Image (cartoon, grey):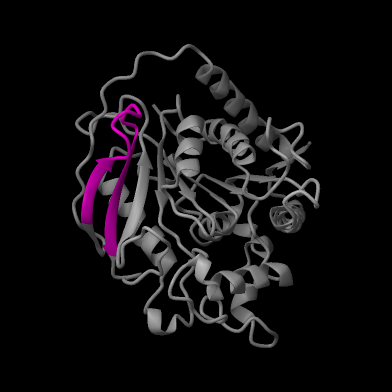
Amino acid sequence: MKTRFRSPRGTAAVVAGLAFASALAAPAAVAEAVTLPHFENGFGLTVVQQPAWVDESDGRRTFTFSVSSDQVPTPTLLPGQIAGQHLIMVTLPDGYDDAAATRYPVLYNLHGNPDRPNTIPNLEITEKSTKKAPLITVAPNGVRSWYSNWVNPGAVGPQNWENFHLGQLIPLIDANMKTIGSKEGRAIVGHSMGGFGAFHYAEHRPDLFSYVGALSGGLDLLSQEIRAAVIGTSVDSSAGVPTVGADAIFGPPIWPFDGIWNAQSPAQHVSSLRGMGVALYTGNGGNLLDNPIQAVFENRARETALVTAANLNAAGIPYYFADYGDGSTWAPGCTGKHAQQPCLQADMDHFVPLIMGRLQHP
């Protein structure tokens, strides 16, 4: 595995994160009872389902609630999703009390495609990686959004996902939960399409986040392979129904009509991340004959991470890069594939202490 550090400042953040990780390794205290919050409407969002625990036996750390949004009134749907609704999954720190004065930082965790925020792997990864951290984690619905305001949504209607997540969901969370509602108390991370979204959001709104991370993110829209992936998620019914046009999200993907693709590519627009913590995680796909589709996806995602790292170097922006190859030295069961739970668990197990070395927290 190759790990790369840039500048003493980046190293200091890692050292602080490792100190926090050591604290997490201490014996756990008995968890206090956790209060389930109640959400009020606001910021263009209507709460259509109040918080409910995912599992009464899970220690009452994770709940889901649902909203409708005037920015994305009709999201496309994966199996089990409800028309017109956005499910949000929230994982609380032990001892969270909605009536107490203690406030916590928030990590926004963006899923890939085809995926949903509340799948069992996403739940397990989040709960394990944040088990002893004084941290709220929010995983919003993203379907095939590419976490962007679409330019040609067509018959599905407005798909202003960036407006929904940054302009509506973040203030709703801050208004209804005990958060540290400032940049110093907020980080963002995502897997695959979600890694694109995390960098996209952090670059557009550096005033909102102190740390950004991508787990096998598709970060380079100048790559024809990533463009093919975006188009694939648009036209493939397994990524959501109804399907949409190839130009729905970023417009036509071919020169000279591809200006929006170029303008929205995170890999080429890293300058606004200056002063923010930055982390990249990727394998190389490992054995390309073993699960070749996931192997190729990861191999190509790695190339976009390398382009992003080169641009961060050129801009003099410090970052952490876990380039763990076939995964054999990263985590048991990780073979460097794209959507492999042991790899993603190890990524998040590393990322959470990293951000806690920078975020304000109790």
* Viewer-proximal residue among 177 and 181: 177
In the rendered image of this protein, does residue 178 appear above or below residue 77? above
Q: Quadrant of the N terminus?
A: top right
Residue 231 drawn at (x, y percent): 60, 74
Part of the protein shown in magenta: 48-68
In the rendered image of this protein, does residue 210 appear above or below residue 132? below
Residue 276 drawn at (x, y percent): 57, 46
In the rendered image of this protein, does residue 324 appear above or below residue 175? above
Q: Is residue 64 magenta?
A: yes
Q: Kindly indicate the quadrant of the structure image that contains residue 51.
A: top left
Residue drawn at x 57%, y 59% as measured from the top left:
193
Residue farthest bottom in this picture: 256
Q: Quadrant of the C terminus?
A: top left
Q: Is residue 126 visible?
A: yes
Residue drawn at x 41%, y 28% as measured from the top left:
134
Residue 78 drawn at (x, y percent): 43, 62
* Viewer-proximal residue among 95 and 87: 87
Q: Is residue 290 magenta?
A: no
